Amino acid sequence: MRIAYVVPGPMSKTSMGAKEMRRREELLNSWAFPGTEVSVVDVPSGPASIESAYEEAMCVPATIELIMKCERDGFDGAIIGCFGDPGLEAAREMVTMPVVGPCESSMLLAAGLGHKFSILTIFDSMAAGQELLAYRAGVKAKLASVRATGIPVLDLMKDPEATKSRLIDVAKVCVEQDRADALLFGCMTMSFLDMADEISAAVGAPAVNAGKAALKHVETLVSMGLSHSKTAFPTPAKMKAGQSVETLRVA
Amino acid sequence: MRIAYVVPGPMSKTSMGAKEMRRREELLNSWAFPGTEVSVVDVPSGPASIESAYEEAMCVPATIELIMKCERDGFDGAIIGCFGDPGLEAAREMVTMPVVGPCESSMLLAAGLGHKFSILTIFDSMAAGQELLAYRAGVKAKLASVRATGIPVLDLMKDPEATKSRLIDVAKVCVEQDRADALLFGCMTMSFLDMADEISAAVGAPAVNAGKAALKHVETLVSMGLSHSKTAFPTPAKMKAGQSVETLRVA
Amino acid sequence: MRIAYVVPGPMSKTSMGAKEMRRREELLNSWAFPGTEVSVVDVPSGPASIESAYEEAMCVPATIELIMKCERDGFDGAIIGCFGDPGLEAAREMVTMPVVGPCESSMLLAAGLGHKFSILTIFDSMAAGQELLAYRAGVKAKLASVRATGIPVLDLMKDPEATKSRLIDVAKVCVEQDRADALLFGCMTMSFLDMADEISAAVGAPAVNAGKAALKHVETLVSMGLSHSKTAFPTPAKMKAGQSVETLRVA
Amino acid sequence: MRIAYVVPGPMSKTSMGAKEMRRREELLNSWAFPGTEVSVVDVPSGPASIESAYEEAMCVPATIELIMKCERDGFDGAIIGCFGDPGLEAAREMVTMPVVGPCESSMLLAAGLGHKFSILTIFDSMAAGQELLAYRAGVKAKLASVRATGIPVLDLMKDPEATKSRLIDVAKVCVEQDRADALLFGCMTMSFLDMADEISAAVGAPAVNAGKAALKHVETLVSMGLSHSKTAFPTPAKMKAGQSVETLRVA
Amino acid sequence: MRIAYVVPGPMSKTSMGAKEMRRREELLNSWAFPGTEVSVVDVPSGPASIESAYEEAMCVPATIELIMKCERDGFDGAIIGCFGDPGLEAAREMVTMPVVGPCESSMLLAAGLGHKFSILTIFDSMAAGQELLAYRAGVKAKLASVRATGIPVLDLMKDPEATKSRLIDVAKVCVEQDRADALLFGCMTMSFLDMADEISAAVGAPAVNAGKAALKHVETLVSMGLSHSKTAFPTPAKMKAGQSVETLRVA
Amino acid sequence: MRIAYVVPGPMSKTSMGAKEMRRREELLNSWAFPGTEVSVVDVPSGPASIESAYEEAMCVPATIELIMKCERDGFDGAIIGCFGDPGLEAAREMVTMPVVGPCESSMLLAAGLGHKFSILTIFDSMAAGQELLAYRAGVKAKLASVRATGIPVLDLMKDPEATKSRLIDVAKVCVEQDRADALLFGCMTMSFLDMADEISAAVGAPAVNAGKAALKHVETLVSMGLSHSKTAFPTPAKMKAGQSVETLRVA
């Protein structure tokens, strides 16, 4: 199967660049089941990273357009490459192939690892948004806590050892104080540091790489012949009534 | 005080047109407390009406930009003119004046009228989204039901008597079967039909005009010197660190 | 419009006295929208302040009687002047004009300011009661915490600076530890100290004056032609069947 | 042990009269464990029956006064003889002997009989209040439904066979449609009709007599040496500071 | 009435031995209402104590068999003598006499003592299981916390003073930090130390002996002629269709 | 990877027999990702099918023993082959390889397909148990309904067309009345009828084969190097303290 990992910002034009996109593509392919091929693609313009509701809102239109193009290009499924799952509902309305978001995918996976899980996020101000995502995913009852590292997304890769050390410190508080049985990385750059095993070993609780979780989720759906429900994510009524997607926009 | 009612679609370019915008402006000014002046403004392009998550996502960037302009132009507060409250969180991050959404405003008002309320909406497929909005507003425990009339937004004004009759039928089911004590119109065009009093009389329970509710909400906030909390809706971290809003976008 | 602010205790006979009633009346009128006139009235006898379920129960019969008199006297709406909203449901059964309680009003307002709010209350023993009120208002999901200052109601005005300092200390714990985005004063005497702006500035989160919130709530209802639902707060069955209110009591 | 069953209305002066009080006293004594003696007492004035929040509020002050007298008279515990548990929290603040309410007692008992229970009540308008009582008792998660018979309290005993037949009809809907595993009588007059066994047999699910349940609850507490927690129901602060109960009231 | 207290492990073959069984039987009989006779019986083999889901699963088949035998032997009700209530649902399917579990019984009793209660348990790893039991009992909304003493079951009686001191320390944290109004002993050996009164006095909040609570619960049910609902705990379908219990097992 | 599908009853000795076990093994292997090998094994004795809490309790000890043996035999993961997930927690305490249950696996998968899902089960009496499993899985908020077909497990394969027709009828009620967006088969025999695609097409909503879902779940865990958390499912304390599993049982 062919899976598109859609970065909702213009990563190839940022400091991370095309090199980081290729590194992530290689990692994703190394994690995949035999027979899966993953392509990492990005949108032409938008925010360099997504750390606010404003940046999230800005990135969505181009992201949905790119996901629609991926379906036309023959992909079997898509991953939205941001932990905030921007545009997930809208994308599901517009395509029939399965589209997954790393936040939803990793929360559902973490829910099965123990009684409670915690999310390691970037800033305290993102906690309420991630609680809302846990509610939307249906697993808020399993969310022990959201705790921030305070390291901005674009700085996470500057000193990986410092990042790891900070992640371990915060993760320990989640396990010891909040009774988390499992941990999620609430940011794709955290996940692509590929440190889940080391952090898990350090804190004594499984840590979920959200990129891997999203990949396994979409592989599962494609291999089972399943996709999101069209009663939940219906084609817009105007299109059902005959309008094309282009005419939805009035200018 | 000066309040901007921001239509998140290009209403002046649709079949409703500038005339309907002026009609709504007159209604809003007639509903206002003495001393309040309301201006209805729309975005230059976007969906003709918002009946799906896709259309909602499409309208948000231009809507936030217009709200930011309204603040620069000296408005004291803004109403997002769509019951889905599109872009509410992002707009609150980008301005300091109060911004309200008719869905949140009317749910909080309805919560104080009785034990439970119901929403009269357009399509069944919008029910889950409105339940999520009730959760986000904090009053999901008071939501009795969401029931659809099945009349598309752009058809609501074609035969107002038929619309009223259908609204009354659905409202009665909410009161008798779902034990709703109050009713909300889950669409601004329903609210601007200005039929709340007639429908309330017909079903024996108060009906909330979401446009009025949003206006009273923003008038309340401005008159109390209150605005949304900046711990909940913080300025994006990159802007706090010195970037301008223009440089948030990489192209 | 004419609004009655009904003090559920004999304030004019307490140490606060008629002078404090006039001061509160002036404040309320200064907060009102143009065209609103507020009168502060009190009951002839009852507890000096309400700090327990017992004192609350004692004050209710006289309070409802006074609210019924206010309606007969031509008032357009009433505020029950105690944060515990004593007798709110019973009063709504007995009159058709809108009756609001500062607790419900301010919780619904605070719910719209951020993700979570906290209540600053008098004693720890009042926390569970205020959680129940948050549940009844439908916004328990937004309640971050209830924290007590430990200063009895009748002592709050003795040293306003000490009270303010204590309120700021407790409010900071709510924001920093409980992630409250907004604060409520859980006592009318706290609210009438009129310190919300200073406390808000000190803690970096909006603080809601419950007296102002109740006033805006009732002004909103009267101006919208709305009142509480009679399916939720019905006239007692015996009165519907023809009995007068006097004959409900057997002696 | 000596238990007071406190009727919160002047039953001896109503059409039910002293005879019905003696009948209830005999029933209660016949249900008691060996060694328990139950006395039925009523307040001197108040509503003839309690079918609204207004009537409930009216009855509370005299009821608490009578419970305080019962403690002084040497009773070991008290039952508030109305399914709405009027004044339960306030009474617990004022005495140290256990005070129970039939609603709380019977809900906690019913919670242990199966997964869900339903309440058979008087009027539809009482459903929301009984849901609030289920929340306060902590067992709202077990409440399947509240369904009304539509027979006023004072008419329940006029035609016991008609009442029984109506109760069975409503109970069957609770079991078949709402998946209730057990049933409560949401009114003391229903309970004192002593029909639980017949109704249970007719619907195939246990039916709880709230009067029996309250009696067993208070017998359990007294025999275990337990009473309600004084952290939950503290003595009013003014009394802890030395005031007598008489001086709490200013007139 | 005759009540069986069924120990779900072979206590007579452990270090506690038949002597401890007799001591518990004497205590239970001393706590009972006049006319109740309690017999303590144990299963022939199984775990020495139950501190894990594995040990709980191991003990259930023999425990249910013994409860079925008790019913055949003429007992009127049974108590499962372990705070985890092992096999409670299955046992209720197989007998018609009431069967209670100390966890459910004591939680329902504690729910009526105040707003919140806490459980004192053995190990932190048991907290999630006891939260699940609170959910099953329907009173999770009243659970303030589960806190562990860290003393294994079989060591609790070695130094009763040290155990009491540790219980008091943990109980104080529950009351002061978690706002618990009442406490439960989450282990039968803790309860049979019979220290509830001393611990209650030390922390200022009622403490519930789960053994006493279960006994009062089953006495209440038997005296009211009630048992668990057969819609909730039905006889297995194969037995309704004519199979004997022996033929349910294929070997 | 090698996966054991552990049937918790002696299927090879029932009317289904070894032939049905081989058919299920072939189906499972046909559903697996490349590189996965699935073996179906059963326990030596126990209930023929599991339709009650009693039968579930009876099957657990042998099932855990067999899962422990599978780990010793080199399997990489195990599936408990019954929708009730019998013994899931206990098994996870005793092994380190991932163990999944079809109920938990399929609920977590269904949670990602839409807003709500329904379960098609055998008997009405199983609904409450499956709601409890949804709570334990953390996704109760997504459960629209549990509806029974009324066909006993051992009869499901007798007339597959009649079964399919009944499943479609019940599924339609779930979608139309309960607003389910996805469906689960709440019984492994239903799932192994392999009719999910036909039923999904007939009702217009995705249907989840719980056997496939469990397989994909365990493949995901093994391929990610994850297993259930040992803070949630710890090794029994006595074994940590040095006892062998054999000595946990006293006889």
Image: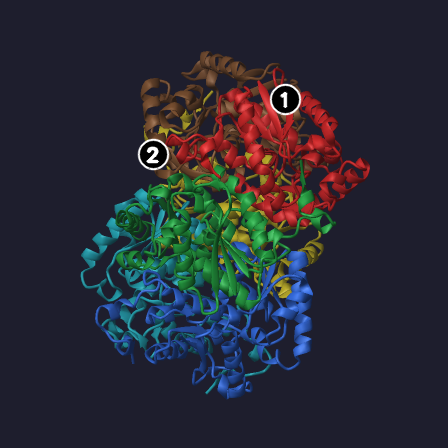
Chain colours: A red, B green, C blue, D cyan, E yellow, F brown
Residue F131 x/y as whole percent: 45, 39
Say which of A98 and E116 sits in front. Answer: A98
Q: Give the amino acid at mark 2.
A: Val
Locate the N terminus of chain F by quadrant.
top right
Neighbor class of circle 1 (other Cα within 10 Å; few <14, some 14-19, many 20+) is: many
Residue under mark 2: which chain is it in? F
From what the image shows, is residue E43 above or below residue C137?
Answer: above
How many numbered circles does the render carry?
2
Circle 2 sits on which residue? F173
From what the image shows, is residue A193 above or below residue E202?
Answer: above
Residue B204 x/y as whole percent: 29, 59
Residue D135 x/y as whole percent: 45, 56
Relative horizontal placement of residue B45, taking residue A59 as reference (left or right): left
From what the image shows, is residue F35 above or below residue C58?
Answer: above
Q: What kind of element bears circle 1?
A: strand
Q: Which mark is residue A38?
A: 1
- Residue F151 is drawn in which quadrant? top left
Q: Does the rendering let one see residue C153?
A: yes
Nearer to us: label 2 or label 1: 1
Residue C118 x/y as whole percent: 59, 61
Relative horizontal placement of residue B247, taking residue B8 as reference (left or right): right
User: Do the dots labelled 2 and 1 sit on one chain?
Assistant: no
